Amino acid sequence: MSRETIPAGTRTSRLLPEDIRSPVLDCSPHPMLIVDGRGNIEYANTALIRTWGLHDASHLVGGDVHRLWKQTDTVDRLLESAMTSGLATNVLDACHSLGTTFPVEIIARRLKSWQNGSVQIAFFVTCVTPEISQLQQELSESKRRLEESQEIAKIGNWELDLQQNILTWSDRVFDIFEVTPVQFGGTYEYFLDLVFPEDRDLVNSSFLDSLDKTRYYEVTHRIHTPTGKLKWVNERCKVFIDCDGQPIRCLGTVRDVTAQVETQRALQIANSQLRSIIDSHNGFVGLLDLEGRLIEINASPFKSNIANRSEVLGRALWETQWFSHHDSNQRKIKSAIQQVLGGRSLRFETTICNQANELVTHDISFEPLLDIEGNIINIATYAVDISQRKQAEVLLRESECFTRSTLDALSAEIAVLDETGIISHANRAWTEFTIACCTYWHTAPKGANYLELCRKAGAIGIKAASRLAQGIDDILEGRCTEFSVEHCCQTANGQQWFLSRGTRYPGGRRVVIVHADITSVKLAELQMEELRNQLVHASRVATMGEMAAGIAHELNQPLAAIRLYSEGGVEGISKGTLNGPELSAMLDKIAGLATRCGQVIRGLREFAMREEPRHVIIDVRDMIHEVLQFMGHECKCSGVNYSLDLGSNTQLVSANPIQLQQVLVNLIRNAIEALADHTRLGRIEICSQSTEDDRNITISVYDNGPGMSSETMSHLFDPFFTTKPSGLGMGLKISQTIVRAHGGTIHCNSEPQIGTTFTIQLPMASNVTNE
Ligand code: ADP
């Protein structure tokens, strides 16, 4: 920064050269003194010598200035104050050479910067007459008031002596700049150094301009204090000129306006933020005066044409392009504003004519804005385009209507349970069933707690009810998303079966319950079961025919033995060759053989007997042994060896044993027949075991017969498919039907010239759910 901020001429031309200073000052009627920085008198003019009653100045020059006054402390303060701030005044009692005192007013002024080491202080003395004393008192009173006012207004004042470039600050200015009197440089440049660098040009040019044009100026700028703070100050300055029109001094005030500037800036930011928030609002935001005229409006209603904003400001809202399309609309808006002026807030639907000249449904609201005393000062209005929402509402209503009529058209009973298990919605079928069948536990009207009903029915032993309650709980607690329970009940229409399914309602803790009447399906299943049994029975009877030769052989041998024993016994008795014990042993043998014949016949009868279908838990290994009691013999007769590998653990399945036996009989018989014309020694291997996951039991029947062609394989389970001249072609079909009815599967692996394996897989008893 240039130090040539104050014009050089202005600063120095008024200083008197040393050699002509004494004669000039001696002409002054007022006493004057010049002392150095330590208070030693350097010069005293003639008026002072005279006023103090001294003979000449020789006694004074070089001596201590304190000797001229009574109050040495006050003199010290005066000197110190003049040194630091450049100017100080006070009233002192002067000590006359005759020993008396008289009051004088002192103006002490620093002549040069005390910092450059050659400071001088000039004392201008005015003798105080009673009138002057009075005026001084008033002056000091007025100064005191001024200072107090400045203190209250937080204004400091300063003075710049342009001739000597001496800057004088009031205490308040020191406070504002946070400078101590010791730090203070006392020149214009010192002040300029404190101005924030970016504001220096502005401050300096304003100052120079005011000197140039000798006029008042005001500038607000930033300063940085020696303590590192940034402050805003407002400076006002007046320039004084001498009789030649040259500026000689400036008087100014300085005010700390940091708080105001910061508040203003915060307000500006808040305003612009508010403006951008309102402008970014998609709808219509307007501020109205009490006449309903638009004072402010956001940008959105203008879309790209924001220039139009100023055209609508000042117009009544109902007369603007958006609301003036219809009289009734205008009346509605006008009346709304009238009601808001009565203190009410209003909200209703209206149509607004948009930029494309379309009428669009809007949700509009009016709010009174109050001042702190509760008086309405403005009206705020907001309008949002709700045409899409309205459209969506219509679609939703239509969709709800469609859903309801669809649900009502369904024959299944459907209900929705809320998170507590209460039926919140039910379709027509549910309601009708509830009315028709009001005694059954699973019928409950809308509003009833279905979950509770299921729990209560479960508590009295109805298993299906407790499974339903458990399923609903699981869905509500998020443990599963669906379940199904089959149950049967006695209704007015007779026995009915239901499949109840529970599903999690999408997007909420609710459950959809659907009861489907599966009575007809169940009856069909039962009929199927009956037919299957009939078929199995027919198949068994047919099997018996095929077994007849083997059975005849089985019976023939013990019967022939019985005949021989009987004939031997008769002969022995008639010839008397048999004694009692021999006869008794012979009769025991006959009885044993007869028992064996009886066993064969009983087995045959049991096999042929028609039994009621029933499912029981059986060990597969026992079932295999039972089958081999009568099939084993057939194997022997056919020259086929068989082996068993049944494992050591129990292999429980839930099955109809007669049906399962029939499957095994069919497979063994097919194996025997396949081996009949085969040249190799026939071998059948029967295995059973549980699967690795312990969920199923597998039974396999292997024969080392000729195997099958791929053509035969592809028709294996077709009804009436046979490659045998006298075959029926139903054995494998019946077997497959039985296995599937038991929840299992049957597969075949066959390789020509290697052999054939049929494998059955059935669920283990623990994995079977008997509904
Ligand atoms: P059927 O025994 O009356 O022919 P099946 O349904 O029991 O009827 O068998 C159908 C056909 O499957 C048989 O005709 C035979 O061709 C073939 N088949 C079944 N088991 C075997 C087997 N173990 N080895 C070779 N072929 C077999």
Image (tube, rainbow, N blue to C red):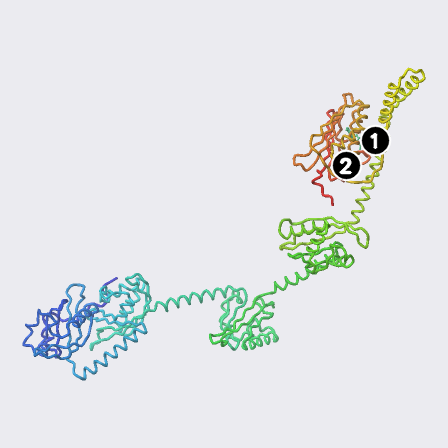
Comparing 737 with 486, the one in front is 486
Q: Ligand 1 is found in which quarter of the picture?
A: top right
The reply to whether the C-beta atoms of the residues labelled 2 and 1 are less than 8 Å apart is no
- Camera-near label (2 vs 1) is 1
**Quarter the C terminus occupies:** top right
24, above or below 635, in the image = below
**Identity of the residue furthest to the bottom in this view:** 131
**Residue count near mark 1 (Cα–Cα under 10 Å), binned few <14, some 14–19, many ≥20:** some
663, above or below 125, in the image = above
- Give me the C-alpha separation between circle 2 and circle 1: 25 Å
- Identify the secondary structure beneath mark 1: helix
**Side of 212 relative to 429 (left or right):** left
Callout 2: CB less than 8 Å from ligand 1: no
Comparing 593 with 103, the one in front is 593
Chain-order first, disc 2 or disc 1: 1
Numbered badge on residue 48: none
**Side of 31 relative to 149 (left or right):** left
Across and down, in percent, residue 86 comes to: 20, 70
371, above or below 631, in the image = below
Is residue 195 at all visible to an observer of this figure? yes
Across and down, in percent, residue 266 comes to: 41, 66
Amino acid type indicated by mark 2: Gln
**Quarter the N terminus occupies:** bottom left
Residue ID for mark 2: 736
Give the quadrant of residue 99: bottom left
Residue ID for mark 1: 603
**Identity of the residue furthest to the front in this view:** 580
Across and down, in percent, residue 176 comes to: 29, 67
Amino acid type indicated by mark 1: Gly
